[in-house]
Amino acid sequence: MKIAICQLDMAWEDKTATKARILSLMSACSPEARIDWIVFPEMTLSGFSMNPEKTTLDASDLAFFSDLACRHKTWVSFGGVQDGRNNLITMDASGRAVSIYSKIHLYSFGGEDQAYRPGSKPEKFTLHNMAVAPAVCFDLRFPYVFWNAAAATDIFVVIASWPARRAEHWMRLLQARAIENQCYVVGVNRTGRDPLLEYSGNSMIFDPLGKVVLDCKDGEGVFVAAAEVDKDLVAKTRARFPFFKDRRPDLACA
């Protein structure tokens, strides 16, 4: 499976301008790339704002991503607010929503818990025979979410608006989630600035051994992984290093 990451600088609280930017970036993506799945950052169209009037997705916003999936014949994962929750939505190549995950751990340090409601349960979907578990930004700091789902997961996808000042944490935590759970991790962050913070991008894909499959660094654009994501590598890694049998779920956080 070929994965692409759209790392972009969103227009602050301006969904129309951000849509135009996404279309411009996607127009430069060659059809020969044969992308199976493209992933966008948290609160894709607005930036990480605590203003629900600007972040909430309406029918036209969902139609935008549905059309994007259909025209490019690819699955699409993106972020936005629905029903007061910070969601990661995934559409298949026909533009149909197949998964909606609501962020469980809200970033109280930045007031997110005052503006939105938390999700209450994990989510999973199947993409090209691979089990995918979604997460959003701050969720990454809570490893039990990943540990609990790991045995039945091939790929964790994390979309974020992770500030540049803690970029090292972002990259190391993504790699740690891949290594300890012996699966792929796709981390998609934004770049650019909003009124409060600077973002360095650093969107990355790690394989089940923690090796870098894709590193977008700080640039804006659509980045396509050179190597395909391979379900067999997950199985082979877990067979070669059967660490799951040594886990103590009775001692793990619930």
Image (spheres, rainbow, N blue to C red):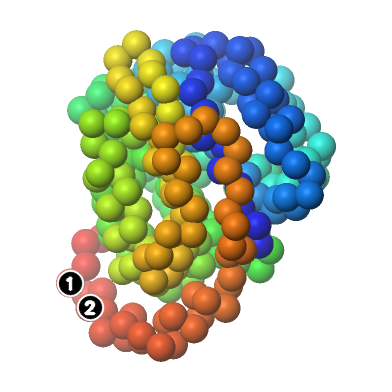
Residue depicted at 28% across the width and 53% down the height: 172
Amino acid type assigned to the residue bearing label 1 in the image: Leu
Residue depicted at 54% across the width and 59% down the height: 132
Residue depicted at 23% across the width and 31% down the height: 165
- Give neighbour class at mark 1: few <14, some 14-19, many 20+ (Cα, 10 Å): few
Q: Closer to the camera, 125 or 234?
A: 234
In this picture, is 204 found above or below 231? above
Amino acid type assigned to the residue bearing label 2 in the image: Arg
Dot 2 corresponds to which residue?
248
How far across and down, in percent of the image, does residue 113 sit? 29, 27
Indicate the quadrant containing the N terminus: top left, top right, bottom left or bottom right: bottom right
The reply to whether discs 1 and 2 touch (Cβ–Cβ < 8 Å) is yes
- Label 1 SS: helix
How far across and down, in percent of the image, does residue 199 sit? 36, 28
Is 155 displayed left or right of 96 in the figure?
Answer: left
Per the rendering, the mark at residue 9 is none
Res 219 seen here: yes
Res 102 seen here: no
Residue depicted at 44% across the width and 87% down the height: 239
Per the rendering, the mark at residue 251 is 1
Q: How many marks?
A: 2
How far apart are labels 1 and 2 at the CA level?
Answer: 6 Å
Is 171 displayed left or right of 12 in the figure?
Answer: left
Is 175 displayed left or right of 254 in the figure?
Answer: right
Indicate the quadrant containing the C terminus: top left, top right, bottom left or bottom right: bottom left
